[in-house]
Amino acid sequence: MSYAIIRNEKLTRTEAKGSYVHNERRTKGHTNKDIDSEKTHLNYYLKKNELSYIKEFDRLKKENDLQGHMRSNSIIMCEMLFTSDKEFFDKIGEKETKRYFEESYNFICSYKNLGEKNIISAVIHLDEGTPHMHLIYIPVIHTKDKEGKEIDKICCRDFWKGRDSYRQLQNAFFEYITSKGFELERGLPVEETGAKHEKIENLKKITNFENTKKVLDNIKLELPETPNINDIKLIKLNREKVEKPKDKLINELYQENRILHKELSKQVKLVDKAIKYEKERKEIMYDNKELHNEVDKIKSEYEEKAFDLEWKYRSKIKSLEKENSHLNKIIDKFYEVIEKFIKWICKKFDIGEEDNLIRDFEKETKINLDSEKQIKHEEREKGWELER
């Protein structure tokens, strides 16, 4: 039975330009030899992009107020490939093939509440060996900002959060598409295919390799049946006769076949290991990239908070300095008024020199008109009381 195939690829701005050129058939000299230019007019859209993928992204980001800090190497969009094998599409016919892609489009519109508004383009290619759909979308998550406000944010890391995110996608698509009446099997797990992080353009190469393994599994190493010599009538033609089949040659060919089969098995195992190691390497590289992104995010948040804190402290210090300056002016003005008041009292009541008046006041009240001296005096007395 045929498989329900869905693949996802993450795209930076640079990679998105390459996908646009291929999907929109923007070049005459196709590197993909499977493309039949005479059938390109059969291609059609479920959602047509009016601009290039990059310009559509910039437009949608602005129109839909999509949040998220984008760097030059950030993942800004993803590309999904929906397909099966040629036998499946030949079997269901043109009308059902169209419905298959329409249902696939409906599936991704509702997957993780993505929404059709965040899909940039959905084009079906019928000018290659097997019909398939390229669907370009922006990985938008619905979340809240620091103030608790509902926002839509571009974040591929959170959209595909978790190591089994692609497995969940495969399961969800298989359940959805089979519920719509299409008889398909679920795609093989990534542990067997090793296709988790493969580029979409390499999918055919992987598929060919899987077919090679299937052929190898179906090879039966059996000796051919040798004809019974008794069943062969001797025929004499021009003194020639039919000779006994050469069993020795058959056995030699059989042994050579066994050796070739063994060697081919080794090669398949070697490729399997290479795919496994490549998969592990890509997972490590992906995790490392995610870690760097997380560090950059923490660093950015820390720098932002540090800047805000520094600004608040600077603002507070400036406010206190202004307040202190005002208080100093009040104190200076207070001393100036007191000094004039004392002079006025002495003159008004003919008391004599103001110094004598101040000295008598401080002696009788034990209060110093010099505030600094008075504060020091009070602190000393408080210290003596504590010692007692």
Image (spheres, rainbow, N blue to C red):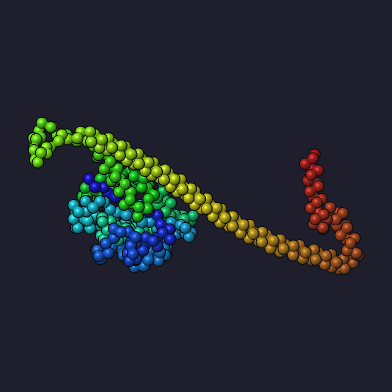
Outermost residue toward the top in this view: 230
Q: Is residue 106 visible?
A: no
Which residue is drawn at the image coordinates 87% and 54% (left, top)? 363
In the rendered image, the residue lying farthest to the front is: 239
Above or below residue 258? Residue 206 is below
**Left or right: 177 with respect to 54?**
left
Residue 63 image-quadrant placement: bottom left
Q: Residue at image x 49%, y 55%?
A: 146
Tally of numbered tags = 0
Location of residue 281 by image quarter? top left
Nearest to the observer: residue 330 or residue 224: 224
Pinpoint residue 136: horizontal percent, then vertical percent: 35, 59
User: Residue drawn at (79%, 50%), measured in percent from left and top?
Assistant: 378
Q: Position of residue 90 (x, y in %)?
A: 20, 54
Residue toward you, 205 or 232: 232
Coordinates of residue 3 in the picture (x, y in percent): 26, 47
Name the one closer to the observer, 70 or 41: 41
Is 319 in front, or is 335? 319
Where the N terminus falls, by quadrant?
top left
Q: Name the spot of residue 301 as percent of width and height, x first.
A: 54, 54
Residue at 27% across, 38% down: 257
Quadrant of the frame with the C terminus = top right
Left or right of residue 152, residue 103 in this image: left
Q: Residue 22: in sight, yes or no?
A: yes
Relative to 174, is 275 on the left or the right?
Answer: right
